[in-house]
Image (cartoon, rainbow, N blue to C red):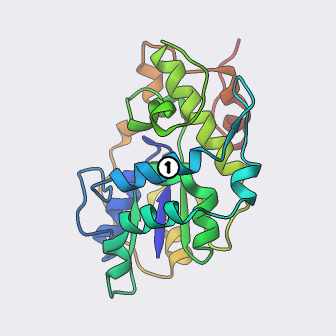
């Protein structure tokens, strides 16, 4: 199986559409974003996971309890209920995508160590321009600083999910893809993905204006705590 993870607005939709166009079964019912729906069981699974995350105040979370504890049967039931159509599918090429999968990645990689994981990265400045279900992590039972600043709330969500993925041991079949590369170097990026998945992939149309939207954005889209990740992935950091 294949799964696509990454915070909402990281470009996971493009990968899901590519997989679907390439003959990969992505679930019984998909929404326009390429998400397997309905998502309610997945949301509840995320809330179970959140109980095992310790908030140390500010923008610091300890994920060690979640990594070490026995995965609760309730979580497994909810998660398997969510991907039921994928599990039942008899084809060899199958998977799913919903950004909330990122919120349970530590348990997922323990349950499915042989899954093929595609992790999408996008400049966080673009990620926080648009609204997403995971903007307010409190909806999923995750403790975060309280704020009325919408952009700051989204930035907190971005950092939490980035930290969660970074703190988790990577499975054997793991690939990271920058959304910007998928747009500007599609052939090169698809070749990497084809080698990783072992299947030919369809080419979908990608609009160049889907990247670097922050350059024309009039709101606040940069926070200092983005800097380490932006350096790691080669994104431009604003001068002070």
Can the viewer see residue 186 in this picture?
yes
* Above or below, 109 relative to 209: below
Q: Find residue 56 and report its image quarter.
A: top right
* Above or below, 118 relative to 199: above
Q: In the picture provided, is 227 more to the left or to the right than 27?
A: right
Where is residue 61 drawn, in percent x and y?
71, 36
Where is residue 145 drawn, in percent x and y?
61, 21
What residue is drawn where x is 64% and y is 30%?
236
* CA neighbours of label 1 inside 10 A, class few (<14), some (14 to 19), many (20+): many
* Above or below, 112 relative to 71: below
Looking at this view, is 84 or 4 the one in front? 84
Q: Quadrant of the C terminus?
A: top right
* Above or below, 66 relative to 7: below
Looking at this view, is 141 or 194 the one in front? 141
Where is residue 49 drawn, in percent x and y?
57, 50
What residue is drawn where x is 54% and y is 48%?
103
Looking at this view, is 139 or 185 the one in front? 139
Where is residue 21 drawn, in percent x and y?
28, 69
What residue is drawn where x is 50% and y is 44%?
7
Count every numbered label the image shows and give the total.
Answer: 1
Can the viewer see residue 181 in this picture?
no
* Residue, disc 1: 46
Please, what secondary structure does the residue beneath circle 1 have? Answer: helix
């Amino acid at each position: 199986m294949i799964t696509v993870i990454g915070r909402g607005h990281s470009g996971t939709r493009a990968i899901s559409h590519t997989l679907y166009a390439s003959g990969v079964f992505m679930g019984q019912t998909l929404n326009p974003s390429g998400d397997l729906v309905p998502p309610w069981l997945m949301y509840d699974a995320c809330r179970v996971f959140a109980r095992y995350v310790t908030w140390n105040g500010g923008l610091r979370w300890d994920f060690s309890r979640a990594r070490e504890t026995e995965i609760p049967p309730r979580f497994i039931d909810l998660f398997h209920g969510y991907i039921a159509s994928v599990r039942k599918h008899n084809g060899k090429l199958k998977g799913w995508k919903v950004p909330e999968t990122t919120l349970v990645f530590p348990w997922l990689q323990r349950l499915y160590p042989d899954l093929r994981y595609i992790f999408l990265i996008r400049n966080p400045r673009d990620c926080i321009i648009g609204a997403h279900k995971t903007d307010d992590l409190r909806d999923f039972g995750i403790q975060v600083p309280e704020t009325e600043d919408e952009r700051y709330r989204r930035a907190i969500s971005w950092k939490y999910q980035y930290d969660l993925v970074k703190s988790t041991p990577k499975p054997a079949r793991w690939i990271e893809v920058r959304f910007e590369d998928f747009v500007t170097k599609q052939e090169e990026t698809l070749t990497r993905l084809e080698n990783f998945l072992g299947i030919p992939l369809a080419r979908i149309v990608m609009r160049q204006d889907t990247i670097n939207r922050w350059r024309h954005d009039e709101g606040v889209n940069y926070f200092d705590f983005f800097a380490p990740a932006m350096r790691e992935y080669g994104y431009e950091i604003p001068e002070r």
